Image: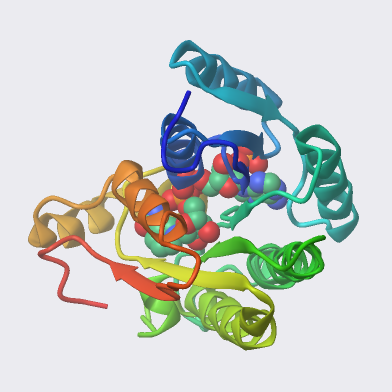
Amino acid sequence: MTGPLSLKTALITGASAGIGWATALHLAKTGCRVVVSARRDERLAELVVEIEAAGGTALALPADASEPAALDRLLADVTDWAGGVPDIVVANAGHGLAGGVLSSDRARWEHMVQLNFLATTHLMRCAAEAMAAREGGGQGDVVVLGSCVGVNISPFSGMYGATKFAVGAAAEALRREVGPRGVRVTTIRPGIVTSEFQEVAGYDAENFGKTVAKFGEVLQPQDVARTIGFVVSQPSHVHVNELTIRPVGQDYP
Ligand SMILES: NC(=O)c1ccc[n+]([C@@H]2O[C@H](COP(=O)([O-])OP(=O)(O)OC[C@H]3O[C@@H](n4cnc5c(N)ncnc54)[C@H](OP(=O)(O)O)[C@@H]3O)[C@@H](O)[C@H]2O)c1
C-alpha cells in the first residue's frame, strides 16, 4: 500500500479498541506498516486481519502497557521487526475513572497513575531517546493521548484529569528536550469520543447519556485517528505539537 506515510513504521498501544484501533487502521491506509499492541490478543488478531484485507501490513504484539519492562520488550521487538527504530509511536493505552477526588474509587488510583502517567511517560522517553539517536540524524513522532480534561479539570473525572495534566506536562517537557534533536512529541487532547472508555471508566450510562445529549453528535474514534494522521504527515520542519479536538457542541470541559 502506498501513501504519504509509506515505508514508515508505527507502533500503537491500546489498539484493541477505540482510538487506538481506528488510528492503526488509518495509518495503515496511508501506507504505514503498523504494530498494534494491547492486552487482548484476540482483538489484535482481528485488527491485523482487517488491515491486511485492506492491503496494509500489520503485526500484533500483545503487551501490558502499565509495565515498563513489557514496554521495553515491545519497543525492542518492533525495532527488530521493522529493521530500525519505529518512525511513529502512539502512546494511546489508558483508561478513565468516574468521579472526583472525593467520589472516585480510591482502589483504582495507583493503577491509573501507573498506566496513564508513569508507564506512558516511560514509553515516550524510550521511544524519543531511540528516535533522537537514530543513525544519520534524529527523526520521529511520539504522539500521546492527553484529554481536554488534562487542561480544564472536570470535577466529574478529577483524578483521571490529573493523570492527563501530568502526562501532558511530561510530553511538553520531553518536546523541549528532543525537538532540537529532530523528534516531535505531540499531545492530542480529545473531548468526548464514544468508545469502550466510558464503560471501563465506570460512567453511569444514564447520566452520561443525558450530558452527551446536550452536546449533539460526539466524536468517533476515526475523528481522532484522522487528527493523528494529520499531525504525523506534516513536513519534517513543521510541528503541530498540541491539538484539541472536541465535538462542536461540547461547551464543557
Ligand atoms: N474516549 C474519550 O472520550 C477520550 C477522551 C480523551 C482522551 N481519551 C484517551 O484516549 C486513549 C484511548 O481511549 P479510547 O477512548 O480509545 O478507550 P478504549 O476504547 O477503552 O480503548 C482503550 C485501549 O487501551 C487498552 N489498554 C487499557 N489498559 C491497558 C493496559 N494495561 N495495557 C495495554 N493496553 C491497555 C485497551 O486494550 P486492552 O483492554 O485489550 O488492553 C484498549 O485497546 C486513552 O488514553 C484515553 O484516556 C479518550
**Relative side of 2 to 250, left or right:** right
Q: Is residue 56 above or below residue 85?
A: above
Q: Nearer the viewer, residue 57 or 109?
A: 57
130 and 91: which one is in front?
130
Identify the image's colour scheme: rainbow, by chain, secondary structure or one colour.
rainbow
Residue at left offset 57%, top offset 71%: 184
Q: Which residue is located at x 69 percent, y 62 percent?
A: 115
Residue 41, how many percent across, how many down?
70, 26
Q: Quadrant of residue 196?
A: top left
- The residue lying at 69 percent from left, 78 percent from top is 181
- Vertical placement of residue 108 versus 22, above or below: below
Quadrant assignment for the C terminus: bottom left
Q: Nearer the viewer, residue 45 or 252?
A: 45
> Which residue is pictured at 58% across the width and 61% down the height?
141
Q: Is residue 108 above or below residue 3?
A: below
Could you tell me residue 150's position as x and y percent? 45, 79
Q: Position of residue 39 (x, y in %)?
A: 71, 37
Residue 40's place in the image compared with 46, above or below, is below
Instruction: Let me know if residue 134 appears in the view.
Output: yes
